Each structure stands twice: as C-alpha cells, then as structure tokens.
Amino acid sequence: MRTLFFVLLVLGWSHGAEHPLSHWTARGPLPTYQTLEHLAEGEGMLVALFGDPNGQGLVSDDGETFQLEDLGLPEGVFATQLVHRPGLWVALASGQLWTKVSWTDEWEGHEMPVPLEQLIWEGGFFWAWSAGAYSNDGISGRQWVNAQLFRSADAQVWTESPIGDQENFLTISQLIEKDGLYMLANGASNGTAGLWSSSDGENWSAVPSVPAGQTALAVGETGWVASGSNGRLSLSPDGLQWTSEQFPYVVYYLTSGQLGSVQPVYSSPRDLTWHDGQFYALAEGYGGAPILVSSASGVTWEVSSGLAGDSSSDFSRAKATHLTSANGQLYILGENGNLWKGANWETEREQLLPQQAWNWTTIAARDDRLVIAGEGGHLLWSDDAVTFSPVQLPEPADVARVIHAPELNLFLAVGGTEAEAKCWLSSDGITWTATAPVHFSNSSLKGAVWDGQYFWACGQAGALARSSDGVAWTPISLGTAVDLTSVNYGGGTYLITASEGLIFYSTDGLSWDSVQLGPETVTYQNASFGNGLWLVPDSYQAHFTEDFEVWWKRDAQAVDSDILFAFGTFIACDQRYLSSSPDGSAWDIHYEGLFGADFPYPAQGGFKHGARFQDRVVFVGDGGLIGVSAAWRDFFAEWQAEQFSPAQLADEAISGPLADPDGDGWANAFEYRFDLNPLLREAVGEASLLHHWVDNVRFDWVGYTGLQGQYTFPWSLDRPGAICWVERFESERGWVRDGLEPDFPSSSQGRYRKSVRVKIEGSDPVLLRLRTEVVRP
C-alpha cells in the first residue's frame, strides 16, 4: 500500500526582528541609477541633488568632475532643493528649511508651519511652498488642501502670501518674476485658473484667459510661455495679454468611434526654461522618447540637432526630466544619474554624468576590504561599504570573477577577451599586477575559487588550471571541450558549472565526474554550497544534492544570477526579486528593500552578484548598482535579553539555545525561531506523534495513524537569528532532504500555512526530524 502523507506546517507571522535582507541602502561612488532632481550653484561649486536618504549629494568644484559628498545635514534628513545667495545657503530638506552662511558651516534648522515641497530665489526673495493635494482626516472625509506660499528676504523671517481661496484648487508648478511682475503657474487640473499674477508678490489675481493645469512656465526676452494639458501652450509678450498655441509634437494617436476617427494626443513640455536667446522645452516625442526642442518666440519649435527622440540615442536613454540654466550653461538632468550641459546646445554639449555607469560583474571581500569589479577593468574598493574609490586595472579587460585567498592575503581577478585570458593579483585590492596565464592563452576566464591551498580558474573550451600563488598555473584536464562558467569549492568538494547541461564534481580536483543535469541547450552559470547542500540555479528553479548521487529540483524565486551563502542561508537574486532559504525547500522573498522608498530600485537591471562583508550582505549589478543590506546582529542574544532576567541569562540551563525552561518540548532555539514564549508551556499542535530530542534536534515518527495525520508547528519569517528545515530518515542513506515536496504558502484565519508532502512506502512510518540552528553574525 502506498499513501501520500501531508505534514502541515502552520506559519504565524512574526512581530520580531525585521530581516536584514528586507532593508537596503544604495551605495557607490556616484548614484548612477537614481534620478537627479535639482542643480544648484554657489561659491564656485555645482551641487546636484537626488533625494538621497543618506543625506548625500554630488558636488563639483570645477563644473566637470563630481564627487559624492555628505551634505552635513542631520541623520535622516535629506535635501531636495538648494539655493545660494551671497553669504547664505538655504536648503529644503525633509520638508523643512535649513540655512548656513558658507558651505563649510553647520546647518541651522527652521521649522515651518507646514511641510514644504519647493524652494527658489526669485525677484529678490526666497519663495517656498507646500504641495496642493487631497487629504483625509478620518472625520471630514476626503478634502482638497491648497498649496501655501511663503516668502522671505533673509530666509529667517517668512510671511505667507495667500492666493485665492480654498475653492480655487491650487498646486504651484513654478513662480517667476520679470520687470516687477510675478507670475505663478497652477498645476491643479481642477483649478479655476492656470496662472496667477501679482505686482508685489502679496496680492494675487487669476489670469482668466489661461486654463487650469499649467505645469511649466518660463520667461525670456520675447515674453512668457506656459505649458498646459494636451500640448496647449499659452503665450504672452507682457504677461497681461495671452494667446493659445498648439505644441506641435504628437506622442501617439487615439482611435475612437465606429468610423475609427483618429485623434492625436499631443506632448506637453514637462519643463521650460530660457537660455541663450531661446526657449527650451523638454518633452516627449512620438512613442514617448524624450526630445529637447527650442523656439525664439514659443510659436515655432525645432528639435535640437541630434536629439530627435530616437529611442536608441544616448539622450533618449538618459530619460531627461529637468532643465535649468546656470553659469551660462543649459543643464539637463535625468534618470540613471544623467547630467548634460551645453553653452550653445546646437553645437556644443557634453554629458557630465554618469562618470561611472559600469556594469559590475563580481564582488569579493576580506575582513576589512571590499572589492567590486566589472567591465573594462574598472574596480571599486571600500573599507566600510559606504565610501567607494575607483581603480583601473593594468592591461584592462572585462573582469569575470574576483576572489580573496585569506591564507595568502591576496585578491585574484580573472577575465579577459574571447581570445586572451587575463589574471590580476593584489595584496590590498587597490594596487594590481597583471599576470600571464599561459595555459589559457586562447580562452577568456570565466570563474575562479580558492580552496585554502590553490587558486582554481576555468574558462572556455574546457580550460581548467590551478595555482598556489596565482602566477604559475598547472593545467587540469576534464576531458571535455565544453565551456566552463564557474568553479566552486565547499564541503571538501569541487563543482564546476558548464554549458550543454553539464556539471562536473571532484573530491580532489584531479579526478572528475560529470552529471548531465539538464538538456544540452542549458548553460549553468554558478553554484553555491551551504548547510551540507550544493545548489545549482536553473532559471526559476534550483537543483540540489547532498552527495552528487541523488539530485532533486525545487521551484524558486530569484535564482537567475549568483547564489550567495551567508549567515546560514542561501541568498538568491534576479532582476526583480531577492529571496533566501536555508535549504532551498521554501524561499522567503524580500520585497521592501528592493521596492521601498529607502532604495531606488532601477527599472532595468538589478542585483546580480553578492558577497558577505563584515556584518552585511552587498549585492552589485548593472548600471553601477550597489546595494548594502542592513546589519546582521546577534538576534538570538537580543531575544534572550528580552525574555530572561539577568539571573536566568547567567544560567545556560535556562536561557541557552538547547534549554527548555518551560518543559513544553521546545528548546529555546525553537521558541525563538517560531516566535513562542520560552517561559510559557504552549500546545503547538504535536497531535499524537511520538517525538524526542537529541542535541536540539526534534525527531518525529510520522505514519498513517487513522487520524488526520497533522504535524503542526508555528513558523515565523522575520527571525534571522536562526534557520530551520525538515529532514527524513532513509535506512541506506541516513538523514536526507530529498523526497520532501513543499507547497506554496496559504493562509487561514490570519495564520500562514505551508505543507510538505512525504511519500510513505507500505505501512511503515517515516521518521522526520526538525532541525533548528542559531546563527551568530
């Protein structure tokens, strides 16, 4: 008789420590994957802001070369606007205002009555305003709250300048002064007026001939231009008399009606400015590609030379978002850290940023040094994963892998071209020496590993060699010409991934066996070892083995790129997800760090390669992407301090990980992992199964008993201080992890549930054991 038995695991969502993999900080020498939002000039400097939660900005002393610098604001306060006047800097940061006399001084905070959205200097005054938006106080329901406008001559004393009343629906897009006339653009599409004017900045009147929803405004020698919806421009020579013109660029055509009438949808300039005798507008061309157009009058527009909206052009890929004129230059700011400038945009323009948008392909760490490498022989090094410095390799070429040998205190980088292998050595990750690996002369190197005695490197056409110093290499024959993509070492065993669906393994590195793991169309890129398991990623699945004899496959999220084993768990990533699992049977997906406000995840690319560095995980990817996780702490020790008195903490028999002070059959390690109370005896669904404990491992007999056969225990996701998995006993092989099929999680009455399917042969029960281990950082 064959019975399919279900072991049900009930998961209770934890309110304990949040997982470090759920919180990430963007790092790097320059924010090549973030949108630049503001550019300021003062004291001979240019400062570019991008709303960095770490309080940093890009600063240039010469207008050409930028460095990432701390702006000196308090922790947790980040600047979005910056204005300089002689003898005074004013910053809008985290909705409030800050001032200082010179760039090297300390900031002084100034509390405002409402959180502010914009800050400018115009017509002899500082101006600041809040956002206009709907709010819901829970009592009055959803109500519109108008923008509030403030002005000051010295940024110390501010007065409010009321505009209309609450029925006017006001949100301020821009404010400009010319010849004593102040003009304000109202971006609210439901407003009663699109422009408001004032002769003194205090008393404002609606401009009746301009419709609501004006999102951009500029003034020049020939008059005023305002931009509204569906490409409608409002023009005036003096700010008093206004006419309407159609912005001529179409984004797409809309077909409607039974006869299929085609209506054009026009582009509306997202930003306007006056520079060098012309209006410049940043807009969308057909299909949404960004275009830069210019006009002397605002009536007839021309696309700037070479910027016709071709989606393959550098300008289009820059995804420009803002225009500003400063120092006699026109600057364009955009996504992915892009910054352009041009004195005469038609004939002279230059891309200032990104300066270092390299694709990172590998990362390695020793205790006090982190090294990141990528295409073109570009490297970064850091001692704290906060400040990074660039390095250029000698005889540069693309780097495929960088590793560290602690016994030699040496970094090894390997790579090259399709026709020539390259190796580089460094004792500090900063100064590198190129070596000539003669045995790889006709093959680019793809992988490398250190086993405690030898460097190993592999590449195309079956190339494999080892070296005790990284200089002299001895070839090793695999008897194959397939391309080798990575060489890995763990648990006393070597594993090489390769093309044509193959992997190779060896216990001594000299005699190798192969496994046809998949079809010949598959190329496996990497592997990882941890908790007694080898894991080989395969798209959105992963192959596992404990002994290379029995392999099993599991569905898994985020295993398209490198698999890192750190802090007792496998950590996997792809272009959208990052997940973790101690044994690959069930993957916890960590969203918040990738999509939350504290990490500006790029639209394309993503984490691809990772390493443990000190108490954190660092992942890198394309476009200069560097992400650093929150710190791993001794979470179990923190839990012990919360649960036990000082006297109990001093007694290992009460508070130790193997102790069971409440006598409920769950050791403290389990109580922590499953978010239970270690001093309260709890019934946790043991049913009628026989169980016993040996060295913090729970053993259970599971078989057909005539009951429902439910084996339940709580589960908690955010308990990073311990790992847990289920194993089954097989008479010939001992304790194994194959033959246990996890299901997708489900929930019931606010609790999460997972099930593991176990095949039972005949009438004999199956012995399972539940293992939990405390993980120290």
Image: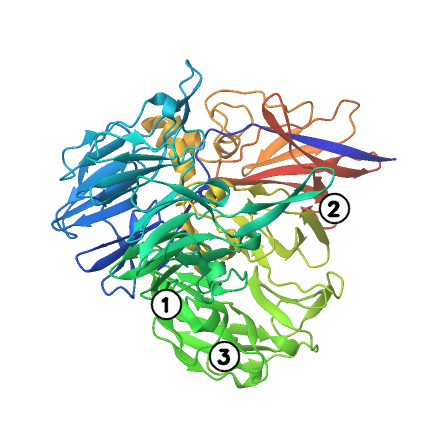
Image mark for residue 422: 3
Amino acid under label 1? Glu
Cα separation between marks 3 and 2: 49 Å
Residue at point 76%, 22% (across, down): 707
Q: Which residue is outermost to the top?
A: 139
SS under mark 3? strand
Question: Dot 3, how many residues are within 10 Å of its Cα: few (below 14), some (14-19), or many (20+)?
Answer: many
Cα separation between marks 1 and 3: 34 Å
Which comes sooner in the sequence, label 1 or label 2?
1
Residue occupied by mark 2: 731
Which comes sooner in the sequence, label 3 or label 2?
3
Q: Which residue is outermost to the right?
A: 1
Which comes sooner in the sequence, label 1 or label 3?
1
Where's residue 499, x and y in %?
68, 68
Amino acid under label 3? Lys
Residue at point 44%, 58% (across, down): 292
Where's residue 657, x and y in %?
46, 36
Question: In the image shown, does 49 or 745 lie closer to the viewer?
Answer: 49
Q: Is residue 288 left or right of residue 519?
A: left
Where's residue 417, x and y in %?
54, 78
Amino acid under label 2? Ser
Where on the picture, by quarter, is residue 752? top right
Q: Tags 3 and 2 in contact by the CB under 8 Å rule? A: no
SS under mark 2? loop
